[in-house]
Amino acid sequence: MHMPFLPPPKLYTDLAHWWPLLSPIEEYRGEAQRYHELFSRHPRPVRTVLELGCGGGNNAFFLKQHYDMTLVDISLQMLAVCAATNPECTLVHGDMRHVRVERQFDAVFMHDAVCYVTTEEDLKLVAETAALHCSEGGLVFMAPDFLGESFREGSSHGGSDDTEGRGIRYLEWTWDPDPDDTMYTVDFAYLLKEADGTVHSEHDRHVLGVFPELTWCTVLRDAGFSPAVVRLEATGSGCDDREAVYAITGTRT
Ligand SMILES: C[S@@+](CC[C@H](N)C(=O)[O-])C[C@H]1O[C@@H](n2cnc3c(N)ncnc32)[C@H](O)[C@@H]1O
């Protein structure tokens, strides 16, 4: 069974132009530095990176200082935001389950976009995409928001303003309607203020996937990686108030 049909979140379609205010680039500096340090420790030097699910390209904005980045996203609206931030990167429109860029990279990176994979079958397709694009000895690095073992319900809020008077404030509510399946829900409430002072609100539901460590490792091993789970200290930036986050890495065998 493949990903059930779910409408894409408004944040990545009609509301994509609000992304830079909802998730400001500066909040990514610390974690991008942490990913760079991890990539630097990989035994085979990393020079080229494919990012699957680049979104607005906030991590890429910092990582491109060190790597030649190719950036893939399923949303044309998010690619437009990303292009404005990262005009020097190669952008590709595609689905991380099926995209074929026809070249290999030293590393394949997936940040929170991998959370939009909600079934094990689709996780296998994503691992296959990663394996096809990763050169021998290369690195796969995935940073989902949660592993099954670290999932917790909760809420947070944030937002920012631009210099022209536009602003966003949001409430983000993470909850799990059915702990026996591989999905959870994040409901967002946005208050969107235009430059003329008008404000309107939007509700946006994101349905995301969560998998235990064993599933991640099995899927990556079956795709041709030697996997490992690494514990990262949380950066404390943005809405990341967790004590620790986990990433899944693998070397292409
Ligand atoms: C939270 S944003 C990623 C932000 C990114 N980590 C950054 O540094 O800016 C999630 C992105 O995943 C993308 N996405 C979701 N499912 C996808 C899929 N199957 N293939 C490619 N991109 C996908 C969405 O379009 C969205 O742009």
Image (cartoon, helix red, strand yellow):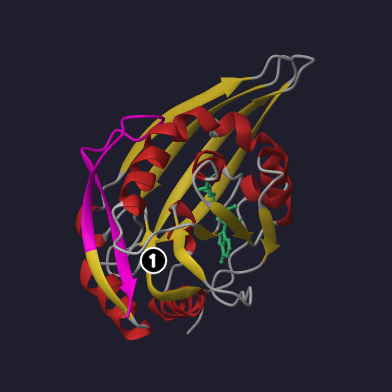
Q: Is residue 247 something that shows in the picture?
A: yes
Tell me which amino acid carries mark 1.
Val
Closest to the observer: 30 or 210? 30
Residue furthest right as drawn: 196
Residue ID at (59%, 50%):
55
Q: Quadrant where the C terminus lies?
A: bottom left
Residue to which mark 1 is pinned: 140
Count the marks: how many?
1
Query: Who's the residue at 69% across and 51% down the image?
Result: 79
Residue 249 is one of the magenta-drawn residues: yes
Q: Position of residue 187 (x, y in %)?
A: 48, 45
Displayed quadrant of residue 195: top right
Residue 31, percent from left and from top = 38, 39
Q: Is residue 33 above or below residue 54?
A: above
Ligand 1 rendered quadrant: bottom right
Tell me if residue 15 can be seen: no
Bin the neighbour count of mark 1 within 10 Å (Cα to Cα): few under 14, some 14-19, many 20 and up: many
Per the image, label 1 sits on a secondary structure element best described as strand
